[in-house]
Image (cartoon, rainbow, N blue to C red):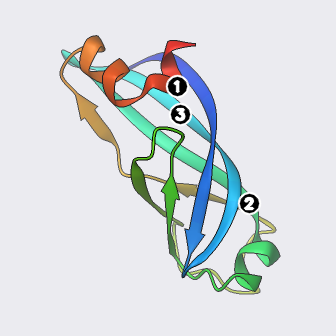
Amino acid sequence: MQHLDQADGTGTLDIGGTLSDMPYHLTTRQEGGGYRVEISVSAPRDWLLQRGFRQEATLRRENGDAVSLQADKRLDVDGPLSVVLTSDASICASEGEMLGKFPELKN
């Protein structure tokens, strides 16, 4: 795998119906003949817990697409102070497909 590019965006994080503006980060890697894109969000543990987060939330990206984000394990008060939520990898066959699905990378 070879690292290609990174980009940032601002979306809306939905935790059980509670909506909050949230910056997110995209990372791309070339994998075989295609591209692998992952989205991540960092947030304070206590902030997430106050909104009812346990392990999964939905991020609505700048282009309106909804992406499921997960923590590594169920969050509780003994967890780390900062929590990274990540998406499953999206695999794109070409650079054109990747840029079509993730316009944030065009910057």
Disc 2, SS: strand
Q: Position of residue 60 (x, y in %)?
A: 50, 53
Q: Amino acid at mark 1?
A: Glu
| Total number of numbered discs in the rendering | 3
Q: Quadrant of residue 19?
A: bottom right
Q: Amino acid at mark 2?
A: Ala
Disc 3, SS: strand
Front residue of 84 and 94: 94
Q: Earlier in the sequence, mark 1 or mark 2?
A: 2
Q: Residues within 10 Å of mark 3 (few under 14, many from 20)?
A: some
Q: Position of residue 5 (x, y in %)?
A: 52, 17
Q: Amino acid at mark 3?
A: Leu
Mark linked to residue 26: 3
Which residue is painted at 56% across and 47% down in the image? 40
* Quarter of the rendering occupied by the C terminus: top right
Mark linked to residue 104: 1
Which residue is painted at 56% across and 69% down in the image? 14
Disc 1, SS: helix
Left or right: 1 in relation to 17 = left
| Residue located beneath label 2 in the image | 43
The span from disc 1 to disc 2 (Cα, nearest Å) is: 21 Å
Which residue is painted at 57% across and 23% down in the image? 6
